[in-house]
Amino acid sequence: MYLKKIDLDEKYVTDEVCLNIFALMTGITEGDVEILRHSSIFIKNHEKMIMVGIRETGLILAYDYNDGSSPRSDKQSQAEHLLFESQWRDQDTVPPENEQEVYIKEDCGINKAIYVIENAHDSWYQLDESAVNSSEITGWLPIENVVL
């Protein structure tokens, strides 16, 4: 499973997520780190002259200005996983629209579902044969952004 586009908005890819990705990609956990947000995210440590870039495609690259190299981290997959996990929407903060097809994340795994709003106080996720209460999920993703 991967996403067609990563939402780089600060409400999803928080400063904490950025710093953790930087640490995974560079091994640097101390010192001043600057986070610049444009169409991509750039995380820089000016003292060590190292930068990590994150693109909306999910690509994460490190660049060492000292020798002009792009070092590959043995923790690249962990950084990519952390970026992916930041994309799950919080049901309480940003609920899906009524009858929107989504992927939901539960303790038992990920399922395809349709969000159903009964009234202002009652909503659930309809699976093929059963339903899941909204309070039982840990996150959701819009189906149109997910590729299996």
Image (cartoon, rainbow, N blue to C red):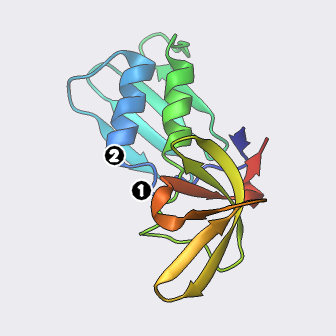
- In contact (CB < 8 Å): disc 2 and disc 1: yes
Which residue is identified by label 2?
A: 15
Q: Amino acid at mark 2?
A: Asp
Q: Callout 2: helix, strand or loop?
A: helix
The disc at residue 10 is: 1
Answer with the quarter of the image where residue 143 lies: bottom right
Residue at image coords 49%, 70% = 94
Q: Position of residue 85 (x, y in %)?
A: 51, 41
- Measure how far apart labels 2 and 1 are at the Cα level: 7 Å
Amino acid, disc 1: Glu
Residue positioned 47% across, 52% down in the render: 138
Left or right of residue 32: residue 122: right
Residue drawn at the location 76% of the way across and 59% of the way down: 129
Is 30 in front, or is 136? 136
Q: Quadrant of the N terminus?
A: top right
Percent across and percent down for residue 73 are 51, 13
Depth order, front residue of 34/130:
130
- The x and y percentages for residue 83 are 52, 39
